[in-house]
Amino acid sequence: MTSTVVIGAGVAGLATAALLARQGHQVEILERCDEIGGRAGSVQRDGFRFDAGPSWYLMPQVFDHFFELFGTSSAAQLDLRTLDPGYAVFSRPGDDGTPTPALTIPYGREKVEEVFEHREPGARAALQKYLASAARTSVMAQKYFLYNPFTRLSPLLRADILRALPELARLLTSSLEGFVARRFHDPVLRQVLGYPAVFLGASPASAPAIYHLMSAYDLAEGVRYPMGGFWEVVQKIADLARQQGVRITTGAEVTAITTSPGHGRRRRATGVAWHSSDGVERHTGADVVVSAADLHHTETRLLPEVARSYPERWWRRRVSGPGAVLVLLGVRGALPQLPHHSLFFTSDWRANFEAIFGDSPRIPDPASIYLCKPSQTDPSVAPPGDENLFVLVPVPADPGLGHGGPDGTGSPAVERTADAAIAQIGRWAGIDDLRSRIVVRQTIGPQDFAEQYHSWRGGMLGPAHILRQSAMFRAQNQSRKVDDLYYAGATTAPGVGVPMCLISAELVAKRINADHSAGPTPPAAGRRP
């Protein structure tokens, strides 16, 4: 039986371990924290439970496929609720301070088209064409690109891909910002169609237009929420892993991936050195090592220089996604002004993104903010009658901005950012007494991402999804210098987000099995013999 050790019990680590154990590997996960989940972790305080990471349930087909690999389904594993409205977009108040009415994105494609048409006459027809293109691109991406290990050229030499090459070339060589601007004039509608770039770690001006495919999910299919939040998703994946025989060891800090001489100049992974929470130094031998930790940390800290496929000089040429200040708020009483998901967009988006990604990075003022109020849908995340708010402020990826803390005790820059966000939400949404009703406040800053998750440059996501860091151009899932060493997670292929982490687990399994196919693995394949 093949012995396998997986570094990290985030979504990618748990999913990879489950898939490999399903195929007959004897798997142990080593997780440095005391709890599983990684960046999809959870914070509990005074009756409130906060998801401290992902909160948008998009690309449902990826979740469906992952659960089908284990003979179950999303419906059996998760209690999914469709949100209506999907989200609202808040804009800056008028000069007299009166809040601007929010643009509400309802559930249902026809209703979304009506909203666009009401906002900009003629936008209905433009949106229909836009979403048709997004749907085609999404199907193409899942069939030929996202699940593709790119170990062979032949899976891409298909007639339908060759026919689509002119369109794909246009989508890859133009920006999402320009693609949207050529079709819509209203600035808020442009923001609705451009904001998915932020969740891909890029700006609309730098993300390729192919990522307009994301609109096929939130606008055409709608937004869902798993009851219990993404913490429940993590628990279900962990349950599947344990059912396959995976052993999860927490409080286990991996300090090195051990290697031995292999063929020629190559080396071979032999296991990992680690220390337990009691400080005892240990070594776990393994036939296969999978690192689901941050790739920069894996390559530049856990491997000797001779074994690095992506050394420090490689990272100097990469572009990081944004950092984040996360503000977790428990609020007394109801907040009917806010739906489950809200977006607060500044009018000068270019200035906002220039502050985050430009040559002189700084915290945007005002910032564009994402807010999730899961208590709108899920009574388990807050005491009865109270509200749970998760606030995300994109900032430069820079640990020097500091760390967060409870009740205003974080670093000055982090707490100033949190104060500004709370004030902005209160003004723009017309909640004059928001600050006075906060009873729980916890912040998380870029330094926390760097220390807790070894995150490269303190970023919240990983390398940005610009063209030269997407698909086959992104760091791949197998070491080029060490045999039997593989990589999973947001910092490797296919990219950031929980669905991408699930796919990365499948890409690792494909590489181990010498499976060069481009699409999702058939559910009947690769089961334990």
Image (cartoon, helix red, strand yellow):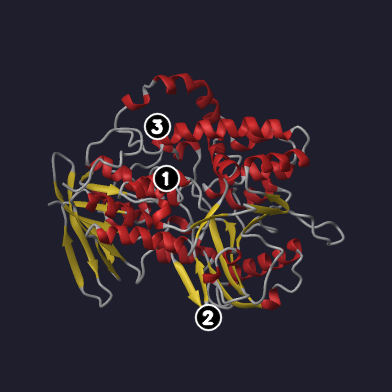
Task: Determine the secondary structure under disc 3.
Answer: helix
Q: Position of residue 462 (x, y in %)?
A: 45, 51
Q: Position of residue 497 (x, y in %)?
A: 46, 50
Task: Determine the secondary structure under disc 1.
Answer: helix
Q: Which residue is at a point 87% across and 61% down the rendered structure image?
A: 96
Residue for badge 3? 144
Residue for badge 2? 46
| Horizontal arrangement in the rendering, residue 372 relative to residue 142 (left or right) | right
Chain-order first, disc 3 or disc 1: 1
Q: Which residue is at a point 26% across and 60% down the rendered structure image?
A: 243
Please tell me the numbered disc located at residue 62: 1
Asked if the residue under mark 2 is in contact with the one under mark 1, i.e. CB atoms within 8 Å, the reply is: no
Q: Position of residue 227 (x, y in %)?
A: 49, 62
Give 354 or 140, whichever is nearer the viewer.
140
Most extreme residue toward the front, as rendered?
76
**How dense is the environment of label 3, judged by Cα within 10 Å: few (below 14), some, or many (20 and up)?**
some
Q: Position of residue 102 (x, y in %)?
A: 74, 54
Task: Determine the secondary structure under disc 2.
Answer: loop
Task: Look at the image and tell me whether residue 182 can be seen.
Answer: no
Residue type at mark 2 is Asp
How far apart, in angstroms, are the residues tagged by discs 3 and 1? 14 Å
Chain-order first, disc 3 or disc 2: 2
| Horizontal arrangement in the rendering, residue 39 relative to residue 265 (left or right) | right
Residue type at mark 1 is Val
Please tell me the numbered disc located at residue 355: none
Give 52 or 388, whichever is nearer the viewer.
388
Q: Which residue is at a point 65% across and 53% down the rendered structure image?
A: 85
How far apart, in angstroms, are the residues tagged by discs 1 and 2? 35 Å
Q: Give the label, 3 or 1, closer to the camera.
A: 1
